[in-house]
Every structure is written in structure tokens, then in C-alpha cells.
Amino acid sequence: MKKPMIIDIHGHYTTAPKALENWRNQQIAGIKDPALMPKVADLKISDDELRESIETNQLKLMKERGSDLTIFSPRASFMAHHIGDFNVSSTWAAICNELCYRVSQLFPDSFVPAAMLPQSPGVDPKTCIPELEKCVKQYGNVGINLNPDPSGGHWTSPPLTDKQWYPIYEKMVEYDIPAMIHVSTSCNACFHTTGAHYLNADTTAVMQLIQGDLFKDFPTLKFIIPHGGGAAPYHWGRFRGLAQEMKKPLLSEHLLKNIYFDTCVYHQPGIDLLTRVIPVDNILFASEMIGAVRGIDPETGAYYDDTKRYVQATPHLNEEQRFKVYEGNARRVFSRLDAQLKAKGR
């Protein structure tokens, strides 16, 4: 069997040059004092700065850990859709998406872009469509990140099954792109951003999709539930039982033709459980490295986010199944990525 291409479907530009954060801080200051609002042209980041930020970080670790390609989107905690209005989010999303595109142009064999959307609390999601279309048509983006809670931990938006979201789903189906369901910074002190809010959102998304019948309206819609699916795989019996009480179909029919889980789970028992509970066709390799958990595990001496180690070591996958997790499933779910790779003879 041929050696798989290791495709990491969950990467964020967490190492962008400091000028990006400085510009954003000035933009936030400009919300209260318009005289301080910076122009887009004020942000100047050279190709050399981009190269350095990638070569000494993501690319270095990819080579060390043996991954080949990363689907690369803006830093999730920086999306911060709750800050400002739609115009603030729109400008910020365009800047961040362009930077990820530039990275993909500088390192075309290693990075492929995915887009953040210019979401804003209380604003119709269809306002995100121009940015989505630009990113797919001009930048070659292969997926999007969709924030189910633009309010930043207060959950003021309707559930993902609500028709308010349908304009985005229609575009996703039209372009055959999946969405990673990914929240951003929590501004609610009750929910730590990466330790609570992210995992709460992953779990909440699964439950919303169980409660509704979204995939009857969009049978080809594809969602990725990141961070191993939050609590969902660990409590799969609970979700199966709740679906049964709601008179829903079996989850294999109701959800698993449309949702996928990544391997951003940072210890061996977690990956062992994920690969035992969730069918292999619904698992995609990912690390979110240089992300929420960057340290070294004192129990193993390895980085927590070196998730390839866990996939390699789990007894629940054979080599054919590992191929699916590493490459096959990603190429099937991200059809535009598959087409780009085939065009390059990969």
C-alpha cells in the first residue's frame, strides 16, 4: 500500500507577524474613537516576514513530525466576531484571509487556505457570502470556518439547523466545500476560550444537528466538528439514546453521512476512544499545532499536539484505515483540495 500523504485539516495562522495584532488593536480602538481607525493600507507585512513566521514555526514542525500539507485558516481566537459591527468584521476577515492566501502562494506544496467569515452578532449570515465567494474563486480556498456563536460565549444566534443559516449552506453545497464548526474568543468569563468554549461549541453543534433535520434539506452538506468532536464521542451512547427518544433515525443515518470529527485530541486514550467509537470514514487527521495546547506532556516527553503519534500508536486502526484518516478522507471531504492535488500530480 502506498505511503499516505499526511494532510492536517486543522491549522491556524497563530504565528502571524506582530504587525497584524497591532493593526487589530488599533482597529478595536477605532471603534470608540473613529479618528484612530486604521486604513487597510496601513498594515504592511512583507513576504519575507511571512516566510520567517512560517518557516520557523509551522513548517519546521511539519517537517519534524512528518506531515505534508496543512489546510490553513486565520487564527480562530482572533476572529472575535463579537467585536464591533459587520464592517469591522468584514475588513478584519478580508485581511486575515488574504494573509493565509499569501502563505499558500509562498508555500504552495505545504499550505492550502480556508476562510474565516465576516460574521457579526445579529447580522444576517448571507452578508458573509461575498467574502466566501471571493475566497473560493480568487484564493482557491477549499473550506470555511463557521462560527455558530458570533456573540462570543452568549449564544444569541439561532441553532445551526435554523433557516437563517441556509444562504451559507446553499453556497457550501454549490461550491462543494465543508465548514469546520469553530467558535472564537469567549467574552463570557464563565467559559475559558479553548478549554471550555471551544469544546462546549463542538458538543453543542452535534446536539443541535441531532435535534433538527438539516441534512434532509441539504443531503450533501459537510461539517467538521473539531477538537475530536468535543464531548460527543465520549458520550456517544447518550446522543444515540437522545436521538432515539426524539424518534430520529440512527445516528449513522441521521448524522454520519454529513459530519466528520478531527483528531485534535491531545492524549493517547482520547484518540483510542475516538477511533473505537466513531467510524473510520468519519475521522480526519488534524493537529491544530501551535494552537491551544503547545507544551510538552511530562508523561510522554512529547508535545501534546503531536497528534500523529497517537494515530500511529492506536490499536484500533490498521494501515488501510490509517490511510483514510491521513489522506483518503480529507480528499473525499475537501473535494476542491483533491482537485488541486490531482492537478499537481499528487
Image: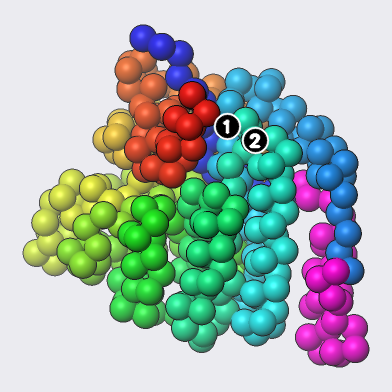
Q: Nearer the viewer, residue 203 or 74?
A: 74
Which quarter of the figure has residue 82? bottom right
Where disc 1 sits, the SS reads strand
Residue, far top: 1
Q: Position of residue 4 (x, y in %)?
A: 45, 19
Q: Residues within 10 Å of mark 2 (few under 14, many from 20)?
A: few
Give percent across and percent down for residue 76. Answer: 62, 57
The residue drawn where x is 84% and y is 75% is 39
Q: Nearer the viewer, residue 164 or 174?
A: 174
Residue at which label 2 appears: 108
Q: Is residue 268 magenta?
A: no
Tell me the amino acid under the disc marked 1.
Leu
Camera-nearest residue between 205 and 42: 42
Amino acid on which the number 2 mark rests in the picture = Pro
Instruction: Give the magenta-colored segment's residue range.
Output: 15-41
Q: Which residue is mark 1?
A: 69
